[in-house]
Amino acid sequence: MQVQPEGSSVTSRIGAARTAGAALFLLTSLNLFNFIDRYILPGVQPLVQKEFGVNDAQIGFLTTVFFFTYMLAAPITGWLGDRFSRKPLIIAGALLWSAATLLTAWVHSYQTLLIRHAVVGIGEATFSIFAPALLADFYPEQDRNRILSIFYATIPVGGALGYITGGVLGQHYGWRMPFFIAALPGVLIALGFWLFVREPERGSADSLAPTFERTRLVGLFRNAAFWTATLGLAMWTFAVGGISTFLPTFFVRFAHMSVAKAGTVTGALTVVDGLLGTVVGGWLGQIWLRRNHRALYLISAWGSILAIPAAALVFFGPQSVFLPAAFVAEFFLFLGTGPNNAALVNSVAAPIRATAISVNLFVIHVLGDAFSPTLIGRISDLTNLRIGLSITLVTLALSGIILFAGAAFAPLLKDSSNP
């Protein structure tokens, strides 16, 4: 047996760390522009409604179409990710949604905008499945909460930039301009990923026992840790998808803001709260996880529950409390972002991880934001937007209950111990 020189081993570890860091940076950057693109539409919704003469249900249906194709593409891409190299698949997905975003500049009918959203959904489904699965092969279970908290911090930042870009540029240059500007960065980052990232061996960072429930697709249906993380996230996604779609419109109608101001205010709230909530949630999860292996589920559950009273004040309180209540609500909404996704990734092993993430994406969208914007829009058309948004309070309560129950099934990590 040939012994590797110590210096060579150190060099190898440094090279692996640099590759992991490059992958985290580039995938996080790509996710940022993924969410900028996704949240431009809510920022320009009033302008789109004015041009095409569509009601709240129809504007909500744009988001529904996006997530419908997103979740239908997920099982196919998940199957591919467990059998083929994920690097070229990530690049292809990024190029697809960047191209569809660019073509939005030439959309001149509501029906064409529906098709555009469907194509973007396919591209984003590819990236959203493969990126966390690939990161899991760079980092061990006990570090994934920290890494995925960094990766998913791009949700609020990208959402905020999408709101602001959409609202400000849309008001001054028309609603198509923000989409045009958002397209190019995804292409450049995909190029950097192709040049600088080497894909690791599948499962190289896993240490948990490869049980039947964790390694076989049939066993996945008996995996309670996976299903409670997924169903809890689905109820959270219903709420966040509906709120994020209509919050700028809510501010326009009930706080009497302009489109630009509503987009800017929503974006500012989202970026500050999202970063603060995601960072605090990830930090608490990392500390608590050392003493309690159930921490990832418990933090996610408390985040959903504590967001409810503040969100209720936004929907039904006086105008004077809109902004402070929205600040508190969004902080708690983002508290479980990293922990919940880390719990999901840790619930399965490498052989089925991409497929499991695709099942998760299918479920959270079919039960969550694939139809919550349309449902909220229909209730709003029949009553008002306050009543429409109030159904998110029920799903947040369900999210908390499911995740509290899921804590009993959390896997015992190498550095964790029973409370």
Image (spheres, grey):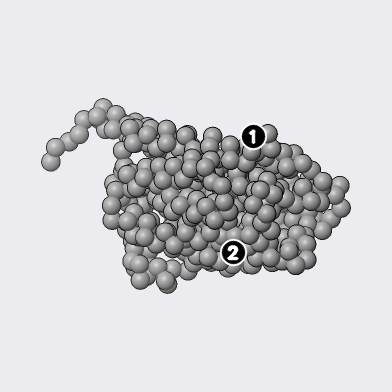
Label 1 packing within 10 angstroms: few (<14), some (14-19), many (20+): few
User: Looking at the image, is 218 positioned above or below residue 360?
Assistant: below
**Which residue is located at x 37 percent, y 42 percent?**
91
Q: Report the residue marked by disc 2.
A: 371
Report the residue marked by disc 1: 173
Q: Which label is found at residue 75? A: none
Q: Quadrant of residue 181?
A: top right
Query: What residue is shown at x 45% (from left), y 37% (from top)?
Result: 186
Quadrant placement of the C terminus: bottom right
Q: Residues within 10 Å of mark 2 (few under 14, many from 20)?
A: many
* Residue type highlighted by circle 1: Tyr
User: Percent position (x, y) of residue 333?
Assistant: 65, 52
Q: Residue 184, image x and y in percent?
A: 47, 34
Residue 310 placement: quadrant: bottom right
What is the residue that sits farthest to the top in this orientation? 7
Q: CA distance from mark 2 to mark 1?
A: 30 Å
Residue that extends furthest to the left in the rendered view of this protein: 1
For the residues bearing labels 2 and 1, Cβ distance under 8 angstroms? no
Of residues 34 and 172, the one nearer the viewer is: 172
Percent coordinates x, y for residue 335 in the rendering: 62, 50
Q: Nearer the viewer, residue 395 or 244?
A: 244
